[in-house]
Image (cartoon, rainbow, N blue to C red):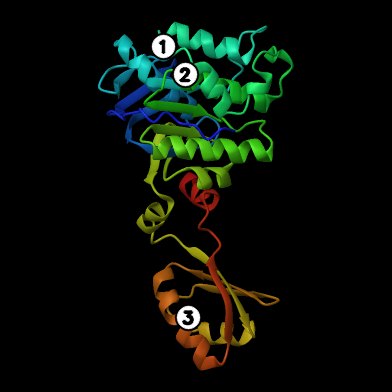
């Protein structure tokens, strides 16, 4: 992919969601949801049916809300036409008409929004690495190539807000790495990039901030460590690789910060709800016991573990 971003881009105020509820008959898709999204990359997480796609559609103006307000770049995306020029959307579903080439799709979106820069479609096709196939009909493209074509089309308007619903689906490892790099560059440039993904380790690589939805409600928001700190009373599991591990386990057994111990080979797993106290005590206890520490790291610091806790 070409490393080419618009040097003239100037960020503007972005997204605010206030008290939003969305009902589909008796089903509650979003319930009194309030959150905001500013410059940078935010990961949107939640199980199927959590309301992620509903929230994205509300932000883009594709869906009206039952109660509450959505503001994008200072306006209601359902009512203020100029707001649509600030939004780029890459939907998860196959929203590309048959028979189109990537160049035709990008040019069509540019024409739809009155983009004056005639070079924008070709520039963004180069950014996503589709220049060589820009005039091939997309009907035979792989899922990953179609996703990249949708990303290029979403960017031709030079949007302030980029909404990406599972944008890495179908991409091979090289494409995934390139798209992750591109999205981070767009966020670093001052755009608001909202990425929904079920591949949680990729969200960890992508996002500076995480928003978690569960059953249409906001379960958590912030960077994953801040969320972890806010849940300090939840139990954590810490992996300690030590020599010999059983001697260290005996030294830890009576400590007030330790809730449980498990030894497997040279791996000692410590359960604790006071990880800070454990971290302070561990070096001294190991030294006193004559134990050598090789590794100490949390086993549940990933977004996946955090997500499981929040769902519970």
Mark 3 lies on residue: 282
Residue 31 image offset from top left, x and y in percent: 37, 29
Asked if the residues shown at circle 2 and circle 1 are in contact, with their CB atoms under 8 angstroms apart, the answer is: yes
Between the residue at mark 2 and the residue at mark 3, the CA separation in whole angstroms equals: 54 Å
Location of the N terminus (image quadrant)? top right
Mark before the other along the chain sequence, 2 or 3: 2
Most foreground residue, 237 or 97: 97
Residue 62 image offset from top left, x and y in percent: 43, 14
Mark before the other along the chain sequence, 1 or 3: 1
Classify residue 233 as left or right of residue 311: left
Give the residue drawn at x 53%, y 40%: 181
Mark 1 lies on residue: 115
Q: Quadrant of residue 144?
A: top right
Q: Is residue 1 visible?
A: yes
Most foreground residue, 48 or 45: 45
Mark 2 lies on residue: 156
* Local secondary structure at mark 3: helix
Residue 173 image offset from top left, x and y in percent: 67, 40
Between the residue at mark 2 and the residue at mark 1, the CA separation in whole angstroms equals: 8 Å
Give the residue drawn at x 42%, y 28%: 6
Badge 1 crowding class, 10 Å Cα cut-off, few under 14, some 14 to 19, many 20 or more, is some
In the rendered image of this protein, does residue 16 appear above or below residue 256?
above
């Amino acid at each position: 992919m070409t490393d080419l971003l618009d040097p003239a881009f100037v960020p503007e105020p972005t997204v605010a969601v206030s008290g939003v509820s969305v009902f589909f008959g008796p089903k509650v898709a979003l319930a009194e949801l309030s959150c905001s999204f500013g410059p940078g990359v935010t990961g949107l997480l939640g199980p199927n049916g959590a309301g992620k796609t509903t929230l994205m559609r509300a932000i883009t103006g594709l869906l009206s809300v039952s109660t509450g307000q959505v503001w994008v770049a200072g306006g209601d995306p359902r009512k203020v036409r100029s707001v649509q020029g600030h939004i780029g959307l890459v939907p998860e579903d196959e929203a590309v008409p048959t028979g189109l080439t990537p160049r035709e799709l990008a040019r069509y979106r540019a024409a739809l929004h009155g983009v004056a820069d005639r070079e924008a479609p070709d520039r963004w096709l180069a950014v996503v690495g589709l220049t060589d196939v820009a005039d091939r009909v997309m009907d035979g493209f792989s899922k990953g190539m179609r996703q990249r074509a949708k990303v290029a089309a979403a960017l031709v308007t030079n949007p302030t807000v980029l909404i990406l619903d599972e944008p890495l689906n179908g991409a091979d490892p090289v494409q995934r790495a390139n798209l992750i790099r591109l999205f981070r560059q767009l966020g670093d440039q001052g755009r608001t990039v909202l990425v929904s993904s079920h591949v949680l380790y990729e969200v960890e690589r992508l996002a500076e901030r995480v928003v978690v939805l569960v059953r249409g409600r906001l379960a958590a928001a912030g960077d994953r460590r801040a969320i972890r700190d806010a849940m300090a009373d939840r139990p954590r599991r810490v992996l300690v690789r030590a020599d010999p591990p059983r001697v260290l386990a005996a030294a830890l057994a009576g400590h007030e910060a330790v809730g449980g111990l498990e030894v497997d080979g040279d791996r000692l797993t410590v359960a604790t709800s006071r990880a800070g106290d454990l971290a302070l005590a561990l070096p001294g206890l190991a030294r006193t016991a004559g134990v050598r520490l090789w590794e100490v790291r949390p086993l549940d610091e990933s977004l996946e573990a955090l997500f499981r806790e929040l769902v519970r």
